[in-house]
Image (tube, rainbow, N blue to C red):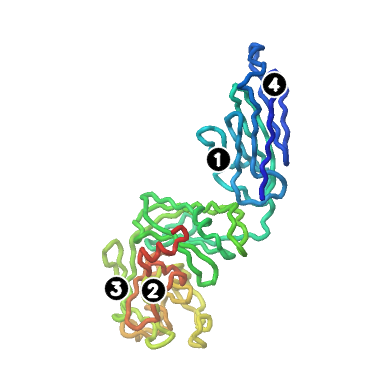
Amino acid sequence: MSRSSHIPVRIHARVRAAVVAALVAPLAACSSSPSPGAPAAEATSSPDDRPVTVSVTPTGKQVPAGEPVRVTVSGGRLTSVTVTDAGGRRLAGKAAADGRSWVSDRKAVPGTAYEVTAATRSAGGIARSARATFTTAKAGKVNKVDWRPGTGTTVGVAQPISLVFDHPVKNRAEVEKQLKVTTSNETQGSWGWMRDWSGRDRVDWRPRSYWKPGTEVTLKAELNGTDSGPGGGWFVRDYTTAFTIGARQIAKVDLDRHQLTLVRDGETVRRIPVSGGTPGGDKRSWRGTAVLMSKEGTINMNSETVGLADAYDKMVDHSMRLTWSGMYAHAAPWNARHLGRANRSSGCIGMSDADAAWFYGQVRPGDPFEITGKDTKGVVAPGNGFGAWNLSWTEWQRMSASR
C-alpha cells in the first residue's frame, strides 16, 4: 500500500534562506522571503500564522503504480502543484475549489521516479513551498496492444476501431474508461468486448450505424499506468490513431443470384457475376455483414490452413480479406464456368480476372460486404474479422464493460 508523507512546518517570515529537502519519506516545507521593505510587524507570529502541513501520496521507493498522485494541505491552501518524472514530463491535475487538495488526472506509471513540488499560502498570507519524491515499482508483466485502423488512413463506412491485447484483460471497465473517441460530428457509438479469432481479448468501437462520409475520428488510448488485472500485466504506454471516413461504398453480394453489386453513395456502380461457397458443407460462405479487412494482392491460398484438407493450394490475384477464418473476395478464373451461375468455390467470393482487377481498385478497407444467401455457414461472428454489424445496436451496447 502507498504511504502518505507529511510534516507540519512553521517557518518565521524573517527567514531569507529557502529550506528545501528532496525527500523519499518525510516532506519538508519552506517559506518565501518577504518583499524588501516589509514592516517587521508582519514577520511576527500571529494567530493566523499556524503550521502548514502538506501530505503527498504515494511516497517512498518501489511503491505500486496505478494510483493518482494526491496532495493535501491543512493550515493553509495550495497555490500550485507540479509533478514531474525523471524525463521532465508533467503529470497534470486539478486542485479542489477550496485549495486544500490536488489530484493528478493520470495515474503514476510503473518504473518511474516522480518529484512533487507544492506551493502553499498560510492563513496569514505566508508563502511556502514543499517538495517530495517517490518511485514506482517496475511492471512485472507488460500488456501490449495491436490496433486498427492506422493513423492517417481513409477507411470505409463500416470500419470499427479495434484493439487486440497481448494478454488477458480482466479490468475491462477500468481499461475502457481510458479509451477516448472523438469525432468531427459527434457520432454515437459504443465499445464492445469479445474474443478475437486469435483467442486474445479484444475491444471494438463501432458507430450505431455506418459512419457518415468525411467524418474525422481520433482515438486516444491513455492506458499507461493501467493494470490489466490478474494475468494481464501493466500497460506502459499510450496509443493514439486518427483516420478519416471515405465514400459510402457497399458491396451487396447475393449468393442466390450469384451477383455482386457495388453501390456508391446510393448509386449502382457495377454488377459483377460471382460464385460463392459450394452448398451443403464446410465450403459454404458466411452471410451477414463482413467488412473488408485488408487488400492483400497476390497471395498463396492453402485450404489446409482453414481446415479443408487438400482442396486447393494456389496463388490467387486481387485478394481482399473479409474474415480471419479465410473468406476472401478475389479473382477466380479457374471457376469461370460457374461465375454468375452457381456457387462452386471453397467459401470465397470469386470473380473473373478483369472484374476482380477493377473491383480491387475501387474498394478500400472498411467497406462493408452485405452478403445474403439461403445455404451458408451462418452469420459472421463479431470476432471473425469485423462482424460487429451483425448484432443489433442494443446487443452491441450490452458488450460494453461500462454498462
N-terminal-most mark, 4 or 2: 4
According to the picture, the residue beneath numbered tag 4 turns out to be 12
Q: Which mark is residue 356?
A: 2
21 displayed left or right of 336: right
At numbered mark 1, what does the secondary structure look like: helix, strand or loop? strand
Q: Viewer-nearest of labels 4 and 3?
A: 4
Q: Earlier in the sequence, mark 2 or mark 3?
A: 3
In the shown orientation, is residue 318 left or right of residue 52?
left
Where is residue 156 shown, x and y percent of the image?
A: 39, 62
- The residue that disc 3 covers is 271
Q: Which sits earlier in the primary sequence, circle 4 or circle 1?
A: 4
Q: Which mark is residue 360?
A: none
- Alpha carbon distance from label 2 to label 3: 12 Å
- Residue 186's place in the image compared with 397, above or below, is above
Q: Earlier in the sequence, mark 3 or mark 1?
A: 1
Real-space Cα distance between discs 1 and 2? Answer: 55 Å
- Graded by Cα atoms within 10 Å as few (under 14), some (14 to 19) or many (20 or more), the crowding at tag 3 reads some
Measure the C-alpha gap from mark 4 to mark 3.
87 Å
Residue 94 % position (x, y) = 53, 38
How far apart are the two marked residues, 3 and 1, measured between alpha carbons? 57 Å
The answer to whether one can see residue 37 in this image is no
Q: Is residue 170 among what the camera can see?
A: yes
Q: Which residue is mark 1?
A: 93
Q: Secondary structure at mark 2?
A: helix
Give the structural element (helix, strand or loop) at label 4: loop
